[in-house]
Image (spheres, helix red, strand yellow):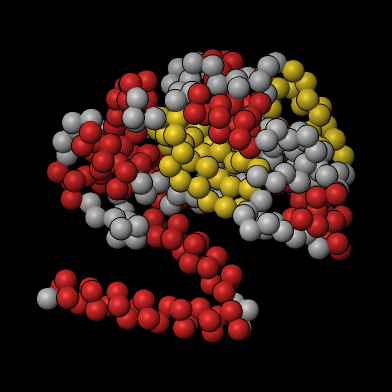
Amino acid sequence: MKSKLFKFSKSVVKILLPVVFKILIKLKLNRRVINFLHEKSYDSNSKYNFTSLLEKFLEKNKIIALDVGAQGGFNSDAFFPKKYDHFFEEILIEPIDFEAKKIRDKKFVINKGLWSEKVKKKLYILDNRLGSSSMYEPNENSFDLHDIREKKYGDYKVTRSIDVECNTLANQLAELNINNLDYLKIDTQGSELEILKGLGKFRPLLIKIEAHFFSMYKNVPSWNKLTNLLYELNYVLIDWKGIGNHATRIPAEADLIFIPNFDNKVGKEIIMQNKNKFISLMLIFGQLKLLQIIIKRFGINDEELAKIEDEYFN
């Protein structure tokens, strides 16, 4: 009976969707509805509550997280449900002084920059749009492609610049006597590749990194150099979320999610060395089906994990 009802519902939806879409096109709402549904698909992760499972796997251990570009605090974009924030030990990198002071209540706040080497770099500050400040200068010639209205161009103008002392990611963690890194997030408006080059021996279990398909800054390295480096480091892309408008039919930027390549020996070793934290991160990020496939391949038996049903991405 359930199977017949499903087939009937599927047939009805198949008939109705093209009609509804034609109406939306007439009303010029089709793109808005698509974007809305896309956003809701990510919000669906908040419907689950894996707190008890996380407590079981982590056993009071914290997930060591490095947030590079921590303006607004850890997980400020709520990419994963904020109810899980307390499972992380946060290390926050924020080179702008007054922004770093706002998050001083955290245990580790580093008021410096990161780069591929120890060097002093110029940071271009956009006081009218502080989150768009960058080590790269904005390119006004690209603004029309990014759907920025001409009257808003002033928000993207550099109001001042500061010299920032930079170190490598590996060196900075060594100074804090941190030997393992579980989660790495980099959102630095174009300098992600240079920061990633300073990873050293660290191999996080999950990486969230921003890539610019069409950068609004001058001389930002091509996004494929970033992804190529991650693949060379034995990581694989498992999810992405588009950011910003562009004159093309793809987003200007995207948050990319990488994990160790579970299909090869090196990636498997990285995962198995900290398998409980890896499982926890996959639950937090809602990667349920992929997690079940990986643990089955690796011979990890857990009845609770096997019973989880992905209600939104089935």
The x and y percentages for residue 211 are 61, 41
Q: Quadrant of residue 29?
A: bottom right
Q: Quadrant of residue 222?
A: top right
Name the residue: 87% across, 55% down.
154
Say whether residue 230 is visible.
Answer: yes
Residue at 32% across, 81% down: 12
Q: Is residue 281 above or below residue 230?
A: below
Q: Nearer the viewer, residue 228 or 121?
A: 228
Placement of the C terminus among the 4 image quadrants: bottom left
Q: Is residue 283 visible?
A: no
Residue 76 position, x and y percent, is 56, 48
Q: Residue at x 50, y 47 (%)?
A: 240
Image quarter hosting the N terminus: bottom left
Q: Residue at x 21, y 37 (%)?
A: 296
Quadrant of the image occupied by residue 187:
top right
Instruction: Tell me where residue 313 appears, x and y as whole percent.
Output: 35, 57
Image side of residue 225 versus residue 141, left or right = left
- Residue extending farthest to the left is 1
The tally of labels here is 0
Q: Give x and y (percent) for residue 138.
A: 81, 43
